Amino acid sequence: MATVEEQKTVFDMDAANMLNKELRDVFASGKTRSYEWRISQLKSIIKMCDDHEEDIADALRQDLSKPELESIVYELTMLKNSCTLALKELKHWMMPEKAKTSLTTFPSSAEIVSEPLGVVLIISAWNYPFLLSLDPLVGAIAAGNAMVLKPSELAPASSSLMAKLLPEYLDSSSVKVVEGAVSETSALLEQKWDKIFYTGNGRVGRIVMGAAAKHLTPVVLELGGKSPVVVDSDIDMQVATRRIIVGKWGCNNGQACISPDYIITTKDCAEKLVGSLKKELETFYGKNPLESKDLSRIVNSSHFARLTKLLDDDKVSGKIVYGGERDEANLRIAPTILLGVPQNSLIMKEEIFGPLLPIFIVSKIEDSFDMINSGTKPLAAYLFTNNKKLKEQFVMSVSAGGVVINDIALHLAVHSVPFGGVGESGTGSYHGKFSFDAFTHKKAVLYRSFVGDAAVRYPPYTRRKLTLMKALITGNVLTILRALLGLS
Amino acid sequence: MEGLEGTLAGVRETFESGRTRSIAWRKSQLKAMIEFVQDNEEKIFKSLDQDLGKHPVEAYRDEIGVVAKSAKHALSCVQKWMTPKKGNLPLLFFPASAQVMPEPFGVVLIMGSWNFPISLTLDPLIGAISAGNAVILKPSELSPTCASFLAETIPKYLDPNAIKVIEGGIDVCHQLLQQKWDKIFFTGSQRVGRIVMTAAAQHLTPVTLELGGKCPAILDSISNPNNMKVIAKRIVGAKWGSCSGQACIAIDYVLVEEKFASCLIDSLRKTMKRFYGESPRESKSICKIGNETNFKRLLNLLKDPLVQASIVHGGSVDEETMFIEPTILLNPPLDSQIMTEEIFGPLLPIITLDNIQESIEFINSKPKPLAIYAFTKDETFKKQILSKTSSGSVTFNDTLVQFICDSLPFGGVGQSGFGRYHGKYSFDSFSHEKAILQRGFFPELEPRYPPWNNFKLQFIKLAYAFNYIGLILLLLGLKN
């Protein structure tokens, strides 16, 4: 980071306005629309990831003490996969889709053309600073837009690395990076964008959507929520707990939007579950998890304070059955399991977004549905069971961005299903083709010729025209014939 | 307002009971909707005549017919739409299955508009019902007869615990927007669209905004006089034939090469005479101006002396009956209001260009319209229009008909709105696509778990790249 000293001019409203104008001109030139431009940019992202794997892992270590494997797997490999898929499928995605036409408009042909929205803004989060910045960017590029990326200031090393690398690898006239915090973001949000893609929390999500409303800009909001895990009896408890552990602590130490937030299980299961969690946690992270190199730290002191406050809540502090250790100087909190915390405690009022995992006991496993549905809709809902009926009920009655049965977070890596929230967990989706669609306008195109002009469409209107009109709109050949022959 | 909150709580309770999710409920409501329009055809004709002076043929074509067609289409497709779609999975996840399952959002608010008070209220409702939502309908108070007709009659046909009609003006809208909805579907102006979206942001509610804009018609050189006749009919139909220009996809202005302008005006005049007779004021085939606000706004557009001077046809106004004669203007100043805001009434400016190619730049200098119409036989020009302009839809050689194609998404882009509906898109517009991944407990891949080491890193990298041969080599210790 030798360039830190570089003089930085203030990024204010005027600067944001100029940047926006500049990008509008570039977009208007048509450069970003070409297939070749999109392909070259996607290839460059892969190259950037390959060339700078270590730099990126370093930045993530600085920002979050993220274990190298997590950095490489969940940020870089996922990202490269998105690029590879887009490279392979782009031609197909860009192709106009034929649409059927009916007798009513005969003779005609119709198609749906995918066109870039224009100039888009991507505001990203600190927990997966590379993936959550560049994965939406892949969609925006694939769809042929010009764009601004605003990485999170809470992961400063990652932010400045992206600000340095992106202009080196990507077309710097069409893809811009703006670093900064609240004031820079506010300046950006004042501008008119053709789409805003925001990843973060509901509070800022509301601000983003409110700002977008002034310009009638569509938004994608990738938020979070309290994603529940329901654990049924009669399952392979060891496999389940291992999957829960890597999904919770093995993904940025619980600081992930699809991280399990709490567990619901039955009484007879709870003991076995806690026992198994303890055992596997120790296998994974050793006797002193505060020292483990395989766990991320808490991102900053304010989040550390927030999490310790949740733990120090009177209703909660006595319920720790595992972990609870913390190291304020190094911003570390050990994987912590809580059993029997009351539902009105602080920890159940907000998304935990950290290494604390409360377990709730219900008398019947089906009662978990009501408990989940009494809260806001989560981004993900997980269920471990071998009971087919329970699976069906869960899928039908729990509303969440995504549902995973017998695993955690794995849907994130599946490109054939959309990733996104519902209700408080957000709106809009991405991944795979859905990313392309998120940044694309689907233009309806209808081709007609000058023949096939029915007089019935035009005034002066008569009763006979009404009869024929009815037949035409229903598109029923027989009725049309009858009407034409004056039989009805 | 306690009454409103009580109503809303009741509707939410109905949704939570799960009733609206069943295919039987959805189908019964769609059938009831078809029955509703069939039984009440005459009443709807009468209401539309009262509010807008809409002729039954126009009313059937643009309102009743649209609703009947959409409901029938939805009825025949809803089962298919509801079926979860399979997602492909990498072999590595085996055994597993992925699905995308549409689920209803919950309780949704639909705000209709006054120009097509039946179809623009009930067409979205068909989507909301097909998707299994509970609905509050807010018809526009500016078409009061239709609004009260809907409020009175809908509960007799549709499940009154799940679908409610709430009448009222700005106050009621304001109160409705304070509530938490799972989706808001709004049809109307940009100004109100902003208000709706700002309110929705407070609750993170997704919105569909069906707005309008200045929809241009491009007229390329057409030498065939028969073609010209057809074009004139289609232009007249798309300006005055649909609620007297008070339609979001009505032609706002025409772009034509200077040398064709007089021929166009001539054809339009002849066609109008054929359609509306010598005195359009007496014609039953043309709507009146919907309300006083719009009437005054339109008069105001005409007040500008330079605009007045550009009138080449019509221009007369009857304040008493709120009638504005079909009016053609030739080259009104481009900075006059009539060319900077959506006209939404029976005034048609014709703008002449030296070369029709300039139309692309002209359109791009304005906000993105809901529709672009282009009359041309030139395939290259068609391609240019498609790739160089942006709009909700593009229709070549015709007007308005894109609205009744169930297979085409209907909706705007930029200032003309976002989100789309019609056919399957209506269903999608009111559905959340839930991603579902199901796995078994076996086989279990050891390298997924910490403590991390280099072997596990290599393994996962290969796994992500779906490099199965590499994986085997690694497992056999043949690769490092």
Image (cartoon, helix red, strand yellow):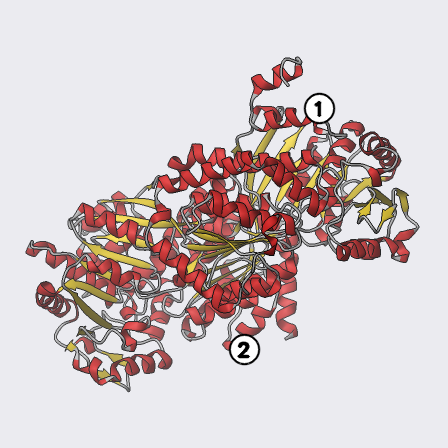
Where residue A75 sits: x, y (%)?
Answer: 61, 39
Quadrant of residue B61 within the rendered picture:
bottom left
Mark found first going from the N terminus, 2 or 1: 2
Where residue B288 sits: x, y (%)?
Answer: 29, 75
Q: Is residue B203 left or right of residue A369?
A: left
Q: Is residue B2 left or right of residue B403?
A: right
Residue type at tag 2 = Asp
Disc number at residue B444?
A: 1
Disc number at residue A34?
A: none
Q: Nearer the viewer, mark 2 or mark 1?
A: 1
Q: Mark 2 points at which residue?
A: B171
Residue type at tag 1 = Glu
Residue A349 shows in this picture: no
Quadrant of residue A281 within the rendered picture:
top right
Residue B228 shows in this picture: yes
Secondary structure of residue under mark 1: loop
Q: Do labels 2 and 1 share a chain?
A: yes
